[in-house]
Image: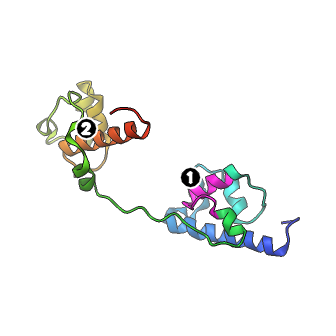
Amino acid sequence: MAGRNDDEGGRWRELGNLLKQRRALLDPRWRNRRAFADDSRLDYRLIYDIEEARRPNFGITTLTAIETAYRLKPGSISAFLEGGEFESVPAAPTVGLADILETLRPDRIPKNHYKSTDADYEGRTRSERIAFAVSRGLVHEAAIWADPDEKLTYAQRRLWVAYLRWRIMESVGLPA
């Protein structure tokens, strides 16, 4: 921490402690720094350096990546270091699949991509359902059954895939 005055060094140490707490709060598995590095795709040494206040020379893109991984508001690390508060991103409200499916407009449901019904899949395990879809050349259906949520029916899975497709197309500005 050479080259920094004591106040600034103390702020970096405080930031490091807050980041450690934040990491553990986000996911109990992330009490392990290595697990957090693997999941966040940040370099382990980078995480170590900022959490242990080993260096103060992080670029803006690096700070932005760190803020994203720790689910902090953009600019919150710089603001904290300048004497402000440590601000996290508010938790997103949980929305259930049923709520999402209710908002799906019927004209957004793709047609002619599916050639099966719930009856075709009854009595089969998840892996057997995937194998059945693949054997018929039904890539969309194989993807539907790849989701491990056993409670969803075939029709709900179709709606879910349609919803995801619609949102992806909408987000990139293409017609669905």
Residue 37 quadrant? bottom right
Callout 2, which amino acid? Answer: Arg
Task: Quickly name the residue at label 1.
Answer: 40
Task: Quickly name the residue at label 2.
Answer: 108
Residue drawn at x 66%, y 50% as measured from the top left: 43
Q: Please state, as top left, top right, bottom left or bottom right, where the N terminus lies in the image.
A: bottom right
Disc 1 + disc 2, Cβ < 8 Å: no
Q: Is residue 135 left or right of residue 69?
A: left
- Whole-percent x, y for residue 164 in the image: 34, 42
Q: For the residues marked 1 and 2, what is the alpha-carbon distance in whole angstroms?
A: 33 Å
Residue drawn at x 26%, y 24% as measured from the top left: 137
Magenta: main secondary structure: helix
Seen from the viewer's position, the closer of residues 119 and 107 is 107
Callout 1, which amino acid? Answer: Ser
Residue drawn at x 35%, y 61% as measured from the top left: 94
Per the rendered image, the range of residues in magenta is 62-76
